[in-house]
Image (tube, rainbow, N blue to C red):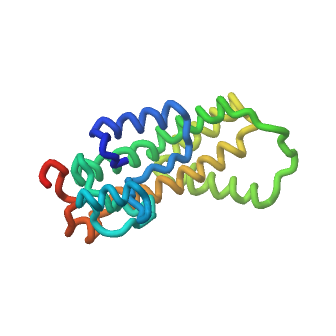
């Protein structure tokens, strides 16, 4: 997010699209202008660059001075991430995936590694985690509707835990990085 044509409505549209399409591992990031691209050259000519491109989609940074302003962009980005990786919406997307997924032949043997992963997921996500209700909701839903896909449902639950942790620890509490805060990125295009 952060394109010139983006308005504050883009954040809700992205959330709705991701949810409706069942994209489980959505990688949402802030626009970066990479040196050597037409975008970089245009923004440099317009005086709308603030620092170098980080190339990291979870550091809550952009080197682009957004037309909508930096604060609305960062607030909207955090809204997207907090919403799509909250346990309820994430579980809903996994169910959408499981409803539509047509697996090939499933191997019958289960490895000790898979059993260990299942037991750890039960302990960490199904017992200790504050969002354990959504874990069990997905497990029981899968057993009722798509039992062959239980290993995939558990794997997706583990992915969800990872994305929720990254969002909670990195994206939501992030402050505006120093090069951006000190640069022109805090201005809107109308102010330049």
- Residue 95 position, x and y percent, is 59, 34
**Residue at screen point 34% across, 61% down:** 61
Q: Nearer the viewer, residue 176 or 162?
A: 176
Residue pushed farthest left?
A: 191
Q: Nearer the viewer, residue 121 or 5?
A: 5
In the image: residue 85, left or right of residue 96: left
Q: Is the C terminus in the top left, top right, bottom left or bottom right quadrant?
A: bottom left
**Residue at screen point 43% across, 33% down:** 16
101 shown above or below 164: above
51 shown above or below 40: below
Circle count: 0
- Residue 180 position, x and y percent, is 26, 65
**Residue at screen point 44% across, 45% down:** 86
In the image: residue 32, left or right of residue 161: left
Q: Nearer the viewer, residue 166 or 179?
A: 179
Question: Residue 148's quadrant in the figure?
Answer: top right
In the image: residue 62, left or right of residue 94: left
- Residue 84 position, x and y percent, is 44, 43
167 shown above or below 98: below
**Residue at screen point 28% across, 49% down:** 73
Q: Nearer the viewer, residue 48 or 162?
A: 48
Question: Residue 186's quadrant in the figure?
Answer: bottom left
In the image: residue 33, left or right of residue 73: right
């Amino acid at each position: 997010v952060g394109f010139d044509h983006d308005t504050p409505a883009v954040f809700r549209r992205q959330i709705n699209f991701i949810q409706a399409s069942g994209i489980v591992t959505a990688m949402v990031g802030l626009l970066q202008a990479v040196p050597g691209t037409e975008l970089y050259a245009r923004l440099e000519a317009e005086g709308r660059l603030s620092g170098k491109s980080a190339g990291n989609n979870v550091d809550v940074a952009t080197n682009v001075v957004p037309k909508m302003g930096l604060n609305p962009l960062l607030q909207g980005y955090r809204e997207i991430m907090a919403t799509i990786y909250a346990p309820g919406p994430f579980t809903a997307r996994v169910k959408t995936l499981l409803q539509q997924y047509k697996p090939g032949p499933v191997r019958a043997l289960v490895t000790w590694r898979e059993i260990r992963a299942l037991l750890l997921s039960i302990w960490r996500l199904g017992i200790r985690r504050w969002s354990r209700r959504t874990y069990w909701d997905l497990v029981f839903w899968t057993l009722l509707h798509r039992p062959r896909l239980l290993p995939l449902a558990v794997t997706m639950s583990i992915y969800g835990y990872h994305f929720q942790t990254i969002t909670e620890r990195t994206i939501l509490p992030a402050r505006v990085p120093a090069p951006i805060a000190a640069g022109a990125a805090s201005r809107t295009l109308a102010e330049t």
